[in-house]
Every structure is written in structure tokens, then in C-alpha cells.
Amino acid sequence: MRTSIATVCLSGALVQKMYAAAEAGFSAIEIFEPDLISAPQSPEEIRALADRLGLSLDLYQPFRDAEGVDEETFATVLHRAEAKFALMRRLGIETMLVCSNVATATIDDDEVSARQLRRLGDLAATYGVKLAYEALAWGRFVDDYRRSWRIVELADHAAVGICLDSFHILSRGHGPKQIEEIPAEKIFFLQLADAPALRMDVLSWSRHHRLFPGEGSFDLPAFLGHVLRAGYDGPLSLEVFNDTFRQTDPVRTARQAQRSLRWLADRTADLLGEETGRSAPLPRLPEVAAPEAFDFVEIKAPDTSGVEVLLEQMGFAFGGRHRSKQVRLWTWGEARIVCNDVPSASPEPHIAAVGFDVADSDAAAERAARLMAPPVHRRTYAGEQALRAFASPDGTEVFLSRAADWIAEFDGGVSSADEHSARIDHVNLVQPWHSFDEAVLFYTSVLSLAPQPAQEVAGPSGLVRSQVMSSPAGGVRLPLNLLPNGQQGRAQHVAIVCDDIVGVVTAARGRGLRPLEVPGNYYADLAARFDLPDDLIDTLRDLDLLYDRDADGEYLHCYTETVGEVFFELVERRERYAGYGAGNAPVRLVSQAG
Ligand SMILES: O=C(O)c1ccc(O)c(O)c1
Ligand SMILES: [Mg+2]
């Protein structure tokens, strides 16, 4: 599979972008004109560097405002184009992207546009250049790929074809099925971008919010499926204008981009089965079912005793010491928390690792490696299980493990005395602003978790963006949170689900647990919103329990105090309630801030 990336996706100067693309394994790049114009190197030097890096220069872009213009204007178009064709010859680039006119078009007539593209094609051909005509979603007259295809068809010139860009098509809600009717040899280029579902003008949406496939809401596997069914056999190229990627490490962004294409190719191959006529089949990833349970959560700090006090109060039982490390296990039913007392990057207790219960850890690790997840190596001793682990974008280590394989390394017998069976319900991880989208892609591709619709929650000092990644049956739920600008606090939490929260919290209070205080106003509001019996409201108030209800069921929950960067949530889900009590989050955030 030939993979390509537009230089506009990456931060830095052109040469840095090229190094990053090559490092991440791309076969080619699209040169975005402003990157070339601002580069101190000559076109020949850029060409030589590309050669040295094994990068092919597949596209020069964009050429703007070419068609639908009066004759006088078209003369200036030809003049401008000729200079670019000569430049492309020096660079050794064969294809130029011509995007539909947004500024100077005055003639809304396909025949006129086609005739002008044909004349441009004649000139291009004398330089050995081909033109890929792209309908911008905000084009003055041409804003739909079906219209750009009609114009290309009318132009009827060997040097004039179409460029398909998923953003322009899917942002406008244009059905991609008719792509299959375009002859493969006329699809000169393919650009791929995802985007979040937003209601805003398409120009701003495109210039600031595009994402790599798998990070947004577009159905890119279905889109690519249509393009491949048409017979397209060229490179899969990413063109993502994004404010965050513009300011973050280009090498890291390029790897993220390559990961997204590998994931997309695999998903698309799955959709198409054997039916692609590509010269080489799409590369597949080892198939791994999403984990349906957390294996463990590891909390690390030089001193985790404050966390252990909370665990014991909640109902966890001490499950033994590790035979060779300063690690202690706490269990409660199927919930396992390990406390690791080591000097670490953060002096405060924090969630250092999350273990996911996967049926085939070898396949899962192979898949993660193919998706370029950075491996984490931990020292193991004779007779100990070497667990497979990778660093997630925020640095939290992700283990692909199963308790049965490692639990015997803890002495002292593993028993959970409590009769209320419990397990880890969700693990809430706070993401730095620059790696939020990368984290969505990481968990989507590496663990096959599905992103749920993003939400925003009002906190006392800003909006918290939250997006849950979850397994199909809901056994694994991973809310990713993004704190308001500039806020560094990384309070993350582990939620434990039990089947009788009133009994559990009553017993926990007896052991000294003091749940986060909930104001009286909250219970007055509950009584107004829901028709709840008085004695239930009294019980909730007495225990500082929060409550939510929707069409699927009910949710009762409370929070512990925060120790370092960690707190816990105790929850009970009734019937099929699948949410997180999002409406209660502002109460928690204010209470924690106080
Ligand atoms: O935003 C733009 O102007 C622009 C330019 C070139 C493209 O290929 C594109 O999709 C958008
Ligand atoms: Mg484009």
C-alpha cells in the first residue's frame, strides 16, 4: 500500500516535515505550496532530499481559481500555471491539484469550465504534468464531486482527471456511492481526512478541525470502499488541516497519521472482502476482539499508602505482596488494583498503567506493534510472566494481560472477603490537549474500542470535554477527559461497580470512608426532577450518593476524596443504564475544587 501525507498536516519547515514523513514509513508526500515557497532549499535540493529519504513527491498543491473565469482572467491563469509546471518539472512532480474556483469565477457553466481545464491540460501535457481537479466544499460554483466529475468528463483530456477528497464530500453529506461510476484511470488522486461532527461553515471546519481517519465521525472505511470499488489503485494520501497538529512534534504526528492509514486499510479490507482489484491487497492487521474486562489498574508513587487506606475502606481485601517488587495487590471480586511503591516521574499517586483482559495477548501485541504503539519494557525475573505493554499517547501504560497469568506472583493468597461482587466499571483518563485525538485513534485501532459521542461538562473553571471509548458489550469503558485550557490538574479516577451501593457505602462509612460531600440543593433538585420516594432521597442524602435515571435504567454513585492524582468512584448500575451520570459531573467538579 502506497501511503502519502500532505506536508500541511505536519508542523515545522518543509525539510523537517519530509524527515518526519519518511521516519513514519510514508512512501510519498504531497507538497503544499506555501511549504515550498518558504523553504530555503532549491527545488532540486528538495528533490534530492526526497530521493535520499525514499519519498516520492506525488502531488503539488493547490493551484487555485483556474476555471469558470472570463478570457482575460484565464490568460493570467495560463501564465501562472506555466510557471508552476516548470517548477514541478524541477521537482520531478507529475500531478498538480487544481481546486475549484472560490474567488474569481464569474461563469457558472460546465462547458466553459471544461474548455478551460482542457486548455490548461494542453499546456500541462507539454510539461509532462497531469491535473487533478478537486471540488472544494465551498467552491463558488463547483462544490460537489459529481459536478467536478462532469466537468472532467466534458474536458475529455488525457491530462485532466479528478481528485477526490473525503472531507469535501462527506462534510456536505454528498453520497459517496457514485464514486464507483468514475473510471479508475480518471481518479488521479485521493485525499483522506476525517472530521468531528460539528455544525459550522465548511471552510472553517476544513481549515481547523480535520482529523486523521479513525479520530472523527466520518465513515472513512465505507468512503474508501467506494473509491477502491471504482478501481483506484493509487496512493492513500492524508490531507489534514488541524490547529493542534500544526503545533506538535511532526514525527509523532506522522506516526499517528501512518497508524490511522493502517487502521483504515484494515477496516476497509474487512468491508470489501476479496473484491478489490488492487495490484496489491490491502494490508491486514491481526484480528483482535475488543477486551470486555479490565484486568487491573496500577497506581504508582513513592508512597501509595493513602490510596491503600481508601481501597480498604471501600471494601478491597489485601491480595498479597509481589515476590520481587515493591508492589501490593488489592482485590474485590474481579476488581484488581496494584499499588507500586517506586520513585516515579510524578511524586504523587497516579494511574500508571491499565491492564486489559485480552483473550490472545500475542495477537494483540502484534497488532499494537503493527500500529506503531511504543512498547514498554519492564524488568521481569525468572519465573515471572513477561507482560505485553505499550505506552498510550498520554504515557499511561496499556497492558495486554490476564490475571490468571500473573496473579501467582503475589504471595499471601488472593481472596476477596466481601459478599458484594465488584469489578472495574470504568477508568477515567485525563488527556493533555495535544494528544486527545491521538488517544481516540490509539484506543480505536490498538484495542478496537469504539468512540462514543463527545460530550462537554461544565466545571467551575471551564468546560471539560469527555469522550468515552467502550467495548461492544460495555465491559470496558474508558472515558477520556480534556481539561479546560491551561489546567494541569490530572485527577483521574477508577470506578468500581457493585450490586448494592447502599450496603457497600454504609459498610465503607463504618470503616471510615468519607465520600465527597454533596450539597443539600442537589437533593432538592433530584426530588423536583424525578419522582423518587422520600425515603430513597433521604438515603441518598445520608450517604452522599448521586443519582441519575434515563430510559435504560438508573445509576447511583459516589466519589472518594482525591489522593495525589487519583480518586475512586463507587457505582451501581440498575437495569441497562449505560451512562456515567454526566449531569452530576458539575456537582462533583465544584465539590472537588472546594
Ligand atoms: O482549504 C483549502 O484551500 C484547500 C486546498 C487544497 C485542498 O486539497 C483542500 O482540500 C483544501
Ligand atoms: Mg483536498
Image (cartoon, rainbow, N blue to C red):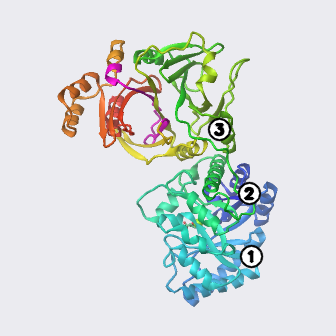
Up-down relation of residue 18 to residue 72 (above or below) = above
Residue situated in front as seen by the camera: 342 or 397: 397
Left or right of residue 45: residue 507: left
SS state under label 1:
helix
Q: Earlier in the sequence, mark 2 or mark 1?
A: 2
Residue situated in front as seen by the camera: 510 or 24: 510
Q: Which mark is residue 27?
A: 2
Instruction: Give the residue type at disc 3.
Output: Ala
Image location (x, y in percent) of residue 491: 45, 30
Magenta segment, which residues?
Answer: 475-504
Q: Quadrant of residue 162?
A: bottom right
SS state under label 3:
helix
Going 34% across and 24% down the picture, which residue do you hit? 501
Instruction: Give the residue type at disc 1.
Output: Ala
Q: Which mark is residue 86?
A: 1
Alpha carbons under labels 2 and 3: distance apart? 26 Å
Q: Which mark is residue 459?
A: none
**Residue behind label 3 places its C-beta within 8 angstroms of ligand 2:** no
Residue situated in front as seen by the camera: 110 or 275: 275
Image location (x, y in percent) of residue 49: 79, 58
Residue on which the image places disc 3: 364
